[in-house]
Image (cartoon, rainbow, N blue to C red):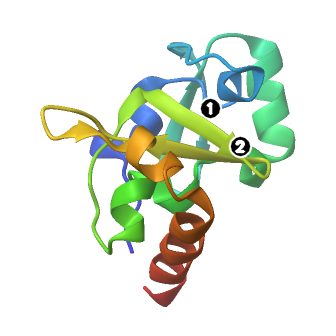
Amino acid sequence: MAVNNADKLAVRGYDVVSYFSGEAKIGDPAISSEHEGSVYYFSNEKNKDAFDATPDKYKPAYGGWCAFAMSEGKQIDIDPRSFKVINGKLHLFYNGVGGDTKSMWEENESERLKKAADVWQSN
């Protein structure tokens, strides 16, 4: 399954390391790294260095697609400000005209986690 990286830009240019501090920060194109065909932006050099040391720790679950949608077998884009770190892994969600999928995810998180993982691994 392809990753969600329009124009090769991961997470719409948000700093994936910042999520682990509880914030969704926009990255700076001048502070970037490439990993597995995607470009990641960071808000500072410290975050870039952390990502470069262990990129798999920071890259989002399910290729950066909406975690809720993945649990239903779909690839839906995300709102990079809607996120949750679960078991040390970044999960992103859609939030827009179609609804807030993070709140729907949280209604049955353990079941959704299993389903999303199954869908992602089967593709």
Is 6 displayed left or right of 113 in the figure? left
- Type of amino acid at the residue the image marks with label 2: Tyr
Is 35 displayed left or right of 8 in the figure? right
In percent of width and height, residue 64 lies at 46, 50
Q: Residue at x 76, y 36 (%)?
A: 51
Quick check: marks 2 and 1 in contact, CB under 8 Å?
yes
CA neighbours of label 1 inside 10 A, class few (<14), some (14 to 19), many (20+): many
Q: Residue at x 48, y 42 (%)?
A: 92
Q: Which residue is mark 1?
A: 16
Specify the quadrant that holds the C terminus.
Answer: bottom left
For label 1, the SS is loop
Q: Which residue is mark 2?
A: 58
In percent of width and height, residue 89 lies at 71, 50
State the CA–CA distance, disc 2 to disc 1.
6 Å
For label 2, the SS is helix
In percent of width and height, residue 41 lies at 55, 25
Badge 2 or badge 1: first in the primary sequence: 1
CA neighbours of label 2 inside 10 A, class few (<14), some (14 to 19), many (20+): many
Is residue 102 depicted above or below 66 in this figure? above
Towards the viewer: 44 or 115? 115
In percent of width and height, residue 18 lies at 68, 21
